[in-house]
């Protein structure tokens, strides 16, 4: 009875969270905070996609910027060359990312561990260089610009919320199905899984294809929302490939809702540094007239990478399974909540 109540609570929380997010634009009129929420939801999609491949299947990737950029360029190039609405990129961006992922997986999945990770890094950097050099097709470093479809951020918010919800739900359903169990068996011991009859190469490719598809969808939506892309922006190793890893690590690798929590923490953390603790240093510098405080605020704005590093070190040391994975430990040690005996 107690287990049934606990399960109902566990299933009820995501629904309440989704309902709260759906109602958010009705009470949040600030375009600035809506923009942050759109970024948060985009990172839910990207982080969940990376987590499916690395967290559940055990294939660590440093190349998810490649799939994100392919999705973004699919939407941008449709408009740039054919004058087709970039919203068709929402249908085709994920498909093209999927088509890039398939041959890459077929070639590189015989590699394991660090070798596969390096191969994925080479994929992202290779496609970035191709997009930079092929100026007549991609526009090179000049990039591609489109006019945003909506003036208000509210439609973009709901579209991103729908995409994030769909990606998390699909991954949750996959992990409860037979392929999900195969993914976990490959992560735990690939040789043992193969000896039991699991086609490890096939299921690693399935995991990569689903991961690439959702990351490409996020890239296509980014193109429609931001209205501008270039190779440096959408194929950035740090901004997308590494950030996807950090989102999953902080939230909880190998958990369904870990990337959602990690996305919120990382977007908030990034914005905290970018704005100098939401303008706190600028305010204190102005109020006190001390130039050193203002200078410190300027230094903080440039130190977000250092902040990310410190955050990840703290998480690895004290929460090795991430916030969601070590939630029971957080409840015991931080909130002093102990399970009833």
Image: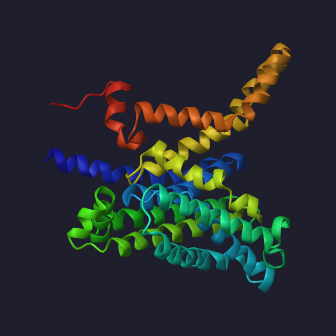
Quadrant of the image occupied by residue 228: bottom right
Q: How many labels does the image show?
A: 0
Residue 191, quarter of the rendered image: bottom left
Residue 161 percent coordinates (x, y): 55, 60
Q: Is residue 30 left or right of residue 121?
A: right
User: Residue 23: x percent and y percent?
Assistant: 54, 53
Can residue 61 be seen here? no
Can residue 132 be seen here? The reply is: yes
User: 140 above or below 287?
Assistant: below
Question: Which residue is the extreme one toward the bottom?
Answer: 82
Q: Give me the residue at 46% from left, 35% from top.
A: 315
| Colour setting | rainbow
The residue positioned 56% from the left and 32% from the top of the image is: 310
Residue 202 horizontal/vertical position (percent): 37, 76
- Residue under the point 73% across and 58% down: 233
Image quadrant where one finds the C terminus: top left
Residue 275 lies left or right of residue 142; in this view the side is: left
Taking 137 as reference, is 332 above or below it?
above
Is the residue 120 above or below the residue 273 in the image? Answer: below
Q: Closer to the camera, 104 or 2?
A: 104
- Name the residue rendered at 81%, 17% in the picture: 292
Image location of residue 278, percent across then percent down: 70, 33
């Amino acid at each position: 009875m107690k287990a049934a109540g606990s399960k109902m609570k566990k299933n009820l929380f995501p629904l309440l969270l989704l309902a709260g997010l759906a109602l958010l634009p009705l009470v949040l009129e600030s375009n600035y905070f809506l923009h942050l929420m759109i970024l948060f939801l985009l990172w839910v999609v990207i982080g969940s996609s990376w987590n499916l491949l690395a967290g559940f299947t055990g294939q660590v990737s440093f190349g998810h910027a490649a799939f994100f950029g392919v999705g973004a360029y699919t939407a941008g190039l449709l408009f740039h060359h054919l004058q087709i609405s970039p919203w068709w990129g929402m249908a085709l961006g994920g498909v093209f990312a999927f088509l890039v992922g398939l041959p890459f997986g077929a070639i590189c999945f015989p590699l394991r561990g660090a070798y596969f990770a390096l191969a994925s890094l080479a994929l992202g950097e290779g496609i970035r260089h191709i997009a930079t050099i092929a100026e007549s097709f991609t526009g090179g470093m000049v990039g591609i610009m489109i006019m945003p479809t909506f003036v208000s951020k509210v439609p973009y918010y709901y579209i991103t919320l729908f995409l994030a919800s769909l990606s998390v739900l699909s991954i949750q359903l996959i992990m409860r199905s037979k392929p999900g169990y195969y993914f976990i068996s490959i992560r735990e011991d690939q040789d043992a899984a193969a000896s039991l009859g699991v086609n490890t190469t096939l299921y690693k490719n399935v995991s990569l294809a689903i991961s690439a598809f959702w990351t490409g969808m996020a890239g296509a939506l980014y193109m429609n929302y931001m209205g501008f892309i270039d190779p440096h922006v959408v194929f950035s190793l740090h901004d997308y490939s590494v950030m996807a890893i950090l989102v999953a690590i902080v939230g909880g690798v190998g958990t369904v809702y870990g990337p959602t929590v990690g996305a919120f923490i990382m977007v908030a953390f990034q914005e905290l540094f970018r704005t100098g603790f939401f303008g706190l240093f600028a305010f204190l510098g102005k109020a006190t007239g001390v130039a050193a405080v203002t200078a410190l605020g300027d230094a903080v704005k440039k130190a977000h990478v250092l902040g990310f590093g410190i955050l990840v070190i703290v998480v690895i040391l004290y929460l090795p399974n991430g916030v969601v994975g070590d939630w029971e430990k957080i409840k015991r040690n931080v909130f002093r909540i102990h399970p009833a005996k």
